[in-house]
Amino acid sequence: MADDLPHKLRSDALDNRERILDAARAVFAAEGMDVPMREIARRAGVGPATLYRRFPTKQALATEAFTEQMHACRTIAEEELADPDPWRGFCRMIERLFELQARNRSVTTAFTSAFPHAIDLAAEREHTLGSLAELARRAKDTGQLRPDFVLDDLILVLMANGGLHAASADARIAVSRRFAALAIRAFRA
């Protein structure tokens, strides 16, 4: 019963939580999801017990860390859906999502994973996918998007873009922009 009561974190516990999330975001962005939890704790300057007390699993940590990335993906989808030219919105959506991924490698995991135990994140992802599907439908209706395009095609190129490697963030962005242009050409009717 006592566990059900909301409680406010002490300021040092709140600081630790934020340091853990900052370290996780940085590590996931730079190196992806394969980094061990102990390494995240080390980079956050906390002990493993502190990390596991706040985030008992890597999925719990990733869910909290990815919330910001999912909001960014949703914002991109909604802004491009609002474009009166669906094909332009579709192309800009690809370019913007690819660049977001190039800047932060964890976006791929956040966007393509279902996170079944994270209801809010799953709902955010489903809303974003719905917006992307509507944008694709509108772009098809203009005759500019391939009639055989399916949303899984977009997920596939997002996953491929997330796997691009380059020596620096600037180089990753340049490679990602080139890949976005190739994907857009492939999707054009």
Image (spheres, rainbow, N blue to C red):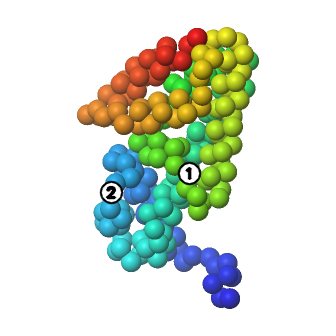
Q: Position of residue 102 (x, y in %)?
A: 41, 34
Check disc 2: other Cα within 10 Å, few if <14, some if 14-19, many if 20+: few
**Is residue 46 toward the left or the right of residue 85 in the image?**
left
Q: Position of residue 97 (x, y in %)?
A: 52, 32
Indicate the secondary structure of the residue bearing disc 1.
loop
**Is residue 15 toward the left or the right of residue 78 in the image?**
left
Q: Position of residue 100 (x, y in %)?
A: 48, 35
Q: Earlier in the sequence, mark 1 or mark 2?
A: 2
Indicate the secondary structure of the residue bearing disc 2.
loop
- Considering every residue shown, the one lying at the far bottom of the view is 1
Q: Residue at x 67, y 31 (%)?
A: 133
Q: Which residue is mark 2?
A: 35
Judge by depth and name the residue closer to the eye, 104 or 140.
Answer: 140
In the displayed structure, would residue 60 be above or below residue 112?
Answer: below
Q: Residue at x 33, y 57 (%)?
A: 35
**Mark 1 → mark 2, Cα distance in angstroms:** 20 Å
Query: In terms of image quadrants, where is residue 1?
Result: bottom right
Q: Residue at x 45, y 68 (%)?
A: 57
In the displayed structure, would residue 9 be above or below residue 177?
Answer: below
Judge by depth and name the residue closer to the eye, 163 or 53.
Answer: 163
- Considering every residue shown, the one lying at the far left of the view is 167
Picture disc at residue 55: none
Check disc 1: other Cα within 10 Å, few if <14, some if 14-19, many if 20+: some
Judge by depth and name the residue closer to the eye, 5 or 153.
Answer: 153
In the displayed structure, would residue 90 be above or below residue 67?
Answer: above
Query: Could you tell me which quadrant the C terminus lies in?
Result: top right
Picture disc at residue 114: 1
Query: In terms of image quadrants, where is residue 38?
Result: bottom left
Res. 6 visible in picture: yes
- Considering every residue shown, the one lying at the far front of the view is 148
Q: Residue at x 40, y 19 (%)?
A: 178
